[in-house]
Amino acid sequence: MAKVILKGKKNDRIEKGHPWVYSTEIETIKGNFSPGDIVEVYSGNNKFLGKGYINPKSQITVRLLTRNKDEEINRDFFKTRIERALSFRKKLNYGDSFRLIYAEADFLPALIVDKFSDVLVLQTLALGIEKYKNIIVEILAELLNPVCIYERNDAPVRELEGLELKKGVLHGKLPEKIIIEENGIKYYVDVENGQKTGYFFDQRENRKAIEPFVKGKEILECFCYTGSFALNAALYGAKSVIAFDYSDDAVYLARENAKLNGFNDICRFEVGNAFDILRNFYNEKRKFDVVILDPPAFAKNKKALEGAVRGYKEINLRGMKLLKPGGFLITSSCSHHVNEDLFFEILMSAAYDAKVTLRIIEKRSQAKDHPILAASEETRYLKFYILQIC
């Protein structure tokens, strides 16, 4: 097994539990290897730090799987890790639909598995985990007996690993329709063509948290995707919800979800660009009791950060201006590169320009099936605020 030797003082972060070794941290590699192989990682003074898979094409050259030198990376290893992940999710009492494996936070780097009732959707986002994909599919089929395991490996991040983009059935047969239930609401999930794996479990508890603020209220939602916040608002007694998304397919599914739950008289879903919608409502002097903003990640990488900051400020500024006195802004960011401090700064700057005062009612993060690895900020990405405008 090849040995990756780190530069002099480049091992503190890894010793504290971070699972990534960057190319710039490596002094030398002793021994032969092929991309995707398991290698050992050592500090500059020859201290063993862990074992993981290597890919010289990636800036993240090694992703650690274990800190135990004697632990073999084989089928039993993956089965044990998957069983532990499943055991943890069962404690959450989320029913039969949840994120089963959250990559590094479940000690299976670059592996995502979402469970939609009896359909599993899998992503292998790095070369090393891709080499074990067939084994992982076998184990998932053995442990969960799903009707289908579907891969959504069309995420562009795979190209950074030298992997092709693809999607399709890996096991069983994909049902014509997939329906899940969350917080007492049913949803159609499009695992073939929806965003990411088809649905976002990470806002589960946050959708429930809006309950005290929506009863009898007129609500505007932007970036509604397939309607989850809007439908929760309807469940909790909203008077009316008008919700927008730029995707025709998402809006179609949101409307179908409203029909499925009997909320089509409360929820109206339309196709539209959120920036235009917010601007137009402001020009029309429209006011709402609650504005909900759940945008996609504006900053996919550090280069996009400056534009992302402008985008987050604009939508939140305009959202604040559309609220009645005492109204609530429910807003979030899923951009890892926009950290908690920066997002709060953006909100404060928007409030200053909107000439309003904010009260923080609640600050939240991602759902419990997306645990945060303490040593890895990359696993902490979702920022969620319920704010009152005074």
Image (cartoon, rainbow, N blue to C red):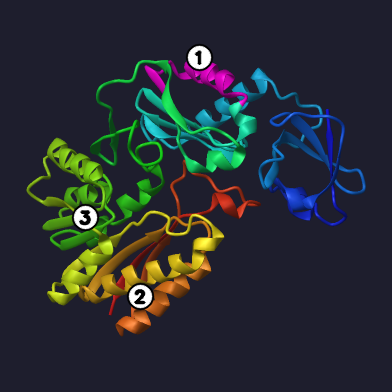
Residue 63 rendering spot, x and y as whole percentages: 68, 40
Determine which residue is flagged by label 2.
359
Vertical placement of residue 159 versus 218, above or below? above
Name the residue beneath numbered marker 1. 142
| Residue shown at the point (35%, 79%) measured from the top left | 351
Is 40 left, or right, of 166 in this rendering?
right
Report whether residue 356 is seen.
no
The residue type indicated by label 3 comes to Phe
Residue under label 3, please give it: 244
What is the magenta range? 131-149
Identify the amino acid type marked 2: Arg
Mark 3 or mark 2: name the one nearer the start of the chain: 3
Question: Picture coordinates of residue 141 (x, y %)?
Answer: 48, 16
Identified at 12% across, 39% down, the residue is 259
Residue 323 spot, x, y in % from top left: 21, 73
Q: Which mark is first along the chain, 1 or 3?
A: 1
The answer to whether marks 1 and 2 mark residues whose Cβ atoms lie closer than 8 Å is no
Comparing marks 1 and 2, which lies closer to the viewer?
A: 1
The residue shown at (23%, 41%) is 249
Q: Secondary structure at mark 2?
A: strand
Q: Position of residue 214 (x, y in %)?
A: 20, 59
